[in-house]
Image (spheres, helix red, strand yellow):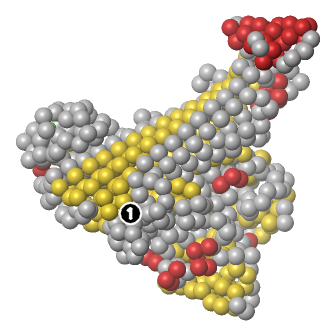
């Protein structure tokens, strides 16, 4: 049998074979002369209309119109403008990019008009939004700035503090055999019976809210006492009373809470708004969330998004393959929702922000943040997150992370990851979501100022649940981790937290400071943990291992590390230097923990194959080798200026401020 018979089958008419060959030749020509067939398509600008041919001089008006007209290899150039759409490409191999340096904004917001007086300073207007499961709230912006869903007490704008919350006492009661939440809210203005029915309660039981916040839907209220149904999973289970007691909290999402400027509420297809002072609602730009996604790349291959801005709109890449997202920005992907069934949120429907369940995709040079939910969700495999800034996520204080990456073989490198109620990077949880990352590479990241509201999290968190599960074989190297903010209480972890028997981690050349525990674990059975060449400063407990009942905690190698503290523990602990003087670092005050030539840590380490092969003379202790190859961590990007959002600048810190003065404006009550 010759190859042709094998390929096309016996008895195939020769004319058919010739036809197939002709097509093959044409296809080869198309690949070889891509410029001839690939087209440039233009969207936006003067005279834009979807009835145009989509040329530079006669551009389309919508990106979707361009997407419908494009075929593989085509490039869509998006001019400056605001695009209120969810773009769903119908072909693979497309590129969508901003035109030159123009500011192209894709938004899930629509303009709200038709305002009339409601009561006092509050106005109302008709508004409906795309129906979607678990998309319980909308979001509202006035002249581009974020407003607050009506709340008691009022929101001060800092989404990760407790200073503006009320004192609460949270409990769990049995009502007709059903676990029901109770919350007593200090100072709550008393109204008639059920004054707060239909609102959400969100509470933090002080040091006891070990994992995440208490949330529930108020089913009844009397005086300042709320009865809550649909309570969050952890509150309902109330493990060892971790989620009860006194703490902080607020009521959100009720018209009766709408009593201050910048507050809004939406119900019965009516939007209520108390405009910011000095803003005339008749001339202001008021926008509310209509759509979940800005782009839907579900199932697509080889699509590139470049230089596009997303506001109040997520990106879903479910089962997407070989796609690239670069120099894009994503803000406000998710609104406040209940999450009572899933502490990881409705991650496929916006809470994931940039949600990737497919493989071999790259997200690089992006800004991602300012959201109630996740920043980036790498659920798929062989994806790369590179040189991004991911900040201000998990405002809802759930099990949501700046970077949530339970997929296998993902690479997370050179990112700046900061400001979260709980974890910085989470690599999965085999107890709750039955998935944790294998063979991940976490490298050259700068992760800081996480854990503002939940003590029992980590700069990096993962949970294998049992030491009998397969090794992760994950490498965590050359990163900087510092300032886990909720650092008091028995549950405070905050460092590299490889929880519940997580095993198979090579953790080397990391610098860690200001966390309660450097490397920690619960539950016993942890094994194959290699902790080499880390520098730990102001870490209360360097290593925290516990032994379980069925499995011993074994093969924990702690070697060539350097700290100003004391008490490294493991099964092999040697060649470490404890109680080091800060004077042996180049500039400890500026957090430069490189060694001086005179440092007693120089050349005091032991050779470890594959870890310190490039050492100058003998290996040094800690994360930097004197005279050796230097390394830095974090994104080289800067937080962009967003012309559509003039007032955010008053709140966040710049990168340099955050490094040198992380406590500024972020005081914890
Ligand atoms: Ca606040
Ligand atoms: Ca209020
Ligand atoms: Ca050396």
**Residue 376 visible in the current orientation:** no
Q: Residue at x 35, y 72 (%)?
A: 547
SS at badge 1: loop
Query: Residue 663 appears in which quarter of the rendering?
Result: bottom left
Q: Which image quarter holds the N terminus?
A: top right
Looking at the rendered structure, the number of numbered marks drawn on it comes to 1
Q: Nearer the viewer, residue 226 or 500?
A: 500
Identify the residue position indicated by label 1 in the image. 526
Q: Does the numbered disc 1 mark a residue whose Cβ is under 8 Å from ligand 3?
A: no
Q: Residues within 10 Å of mark 1 (few under 14, many from 20)?
A: many
Q: Nearer the viewer, residue 214 or 442?
A: 442
- Residue 463, horizontal then vertical, whole percent: 48, 62
Q: Nearer the viewer, residue 480 or 429?
A: 429
Query: Residue 128 appears in which quarter of the rendering?
Result: bottom right
Is 406 drawn above or below residue 193 in the view shown? Answer: above
- Residue 203, horizontal then vertical, whole percent: 56, 75
- Residue 519, horizontal then vertical, whole percent: 33, 60
In this rendering, would 211 be left or right of 550?
A: right
Q: Residue at x 73, y 41 (%)?
A: 298
Q: Nearer the viewer, residue 534 or 125?
A: 534
Q: Residue at x 17, y 37 (%)?
A: 626
**Residue 618 visible in the current orientation:** yes
Is 394 drawn above or below residue 588 in the view shown? Answer: below
Is 194 drawn above or below residue 640 in the view shown? Answer: below
């Amino acid at each position: 049998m010759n190859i042709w018979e094998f390929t096309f089958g016996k008895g195939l008419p020769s004319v058919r074979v010739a036809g197939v060959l002709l097509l093959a030749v044409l296809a080869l020509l198309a690949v070889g002369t891509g410029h001839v067939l690939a087209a440039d398509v233009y969207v936006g600008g003067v005279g834009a209309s979807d009835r145009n041919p989509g040329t530079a001089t006669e551009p389309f008006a919508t990106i979707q119109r361009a997407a419908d007209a494009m075929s593989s290899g085509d490039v869509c150039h998006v001019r400056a403008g605001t695009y209120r759409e969810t773009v769903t490409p119908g072909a693979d191999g497309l590129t969508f990019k901003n035109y030159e340096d123009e500011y192209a904004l894709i938004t899930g917001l629509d303009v709200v008009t038709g305002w009339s007086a409601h009561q006092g300073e509050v106005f109302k207007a008709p508004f409906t939004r795309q129906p979607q499961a678990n998309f319980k709230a909308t979001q509202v912006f006035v002249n581009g700035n974020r407003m607050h869903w009506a709340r008691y007490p009022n929101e001060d704008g800092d989404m990760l503090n407790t200073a503006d919350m009320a004192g609460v006492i949270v409990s769990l009661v049995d009502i007709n055999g059903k676990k029901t939440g109770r919350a007593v809210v200090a100072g709550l203005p008393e109204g008639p019976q059920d004054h707060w029915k239909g609102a959400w309660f969100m509470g933090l039981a002080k040091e006891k809210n070990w994992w995440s916040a208490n949330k529930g839907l108020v089913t009844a209220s009397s005086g300042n006492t709320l009865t809550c149904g649909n309570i969050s999973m952890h509150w309902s289970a109330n493990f060892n009373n971790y989620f009860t007691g006194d703490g902080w909290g607020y009521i959100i999402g009720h018209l009766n809470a709408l009593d201050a400027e910048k507050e809004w509420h939406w119900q019965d297809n009516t939007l209520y708004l108390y405009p910011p002072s000095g803003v005339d609602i008749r001339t202001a730009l008021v926008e509310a969330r209509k759509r979940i996604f800005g782009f839907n790349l579900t199932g697509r291959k080889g699509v590139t998004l470049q230089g596009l801005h997303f506001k109040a709109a997520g990106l879903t890449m479910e089962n997407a393959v070989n796609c690239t997202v670069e120099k894009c920005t994503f803000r406000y992907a998710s609104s406040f929702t209940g999450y009572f069934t899933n502490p990881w949120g409705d991650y496929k429907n916006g809470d994931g922000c940039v949600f990737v369940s497919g493989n071999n995709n790259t997200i690089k040079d992006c800004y991602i943040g300012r959201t109630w939910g996740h920043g980036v969700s790498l659920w798929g495999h062989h994806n790369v997150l590179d040189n991004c800034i991911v900040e201000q996520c998990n405002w809802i204080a759930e099990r949501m992370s700046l970077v949530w990456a339970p997929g296998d073989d993902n690479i997370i490198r050179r990112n700046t990851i900061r400001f979260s109620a709980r974890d910085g990077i989470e690599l999965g949880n085999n107890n709750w979501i039955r998935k944790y990352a294998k063979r991940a590479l976490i490298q050259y990241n700068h992760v800081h100022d996480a854990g503002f509201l939940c003590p029992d999290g980590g700069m990096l968190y993962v949970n294998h649940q049992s030491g009998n599960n397969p090794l992760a074989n994950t490498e965590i190297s050359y990163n900087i981790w510092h300032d886990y903010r909720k650092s008091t209480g028995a549950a405070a972890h905050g460092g590299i937290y490889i929880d519940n028997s997580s095993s198979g981690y090579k953790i080397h050349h990391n610098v860690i400071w200001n966390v309660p525990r450097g490397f920690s674990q619960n539950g016993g059975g942890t094994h194959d943990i290699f902790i080499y060449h880390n520098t730990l400063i102001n870490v209360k407990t360097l290593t925290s291992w516990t032994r379980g009942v069925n499995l011993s905690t074994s093969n924990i190698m702690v070697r060539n590390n350097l700290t100003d503290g004391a008490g490294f523990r493991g099964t092999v602990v040697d060649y470490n230097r404890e109680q080091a003087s800060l004077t042996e670092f180049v500039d400890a005050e500026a957090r430069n923990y490189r060694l001086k030539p005179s440092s007693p840590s120089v050349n005091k380490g032991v050779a470890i194959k594959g870890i310190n092969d490039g050492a100058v003379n003998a290996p040094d202790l800690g994360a930097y080798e004197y005279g050796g190859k230097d390394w830095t961590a974090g994104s080289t990007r800067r937080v962009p200026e967003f012309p559509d959002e003039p007032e955010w600048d008053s709140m966040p810190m710049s990168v340099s401020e955050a490094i040198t003065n992380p406590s500024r404006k972020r005081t914890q009550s």
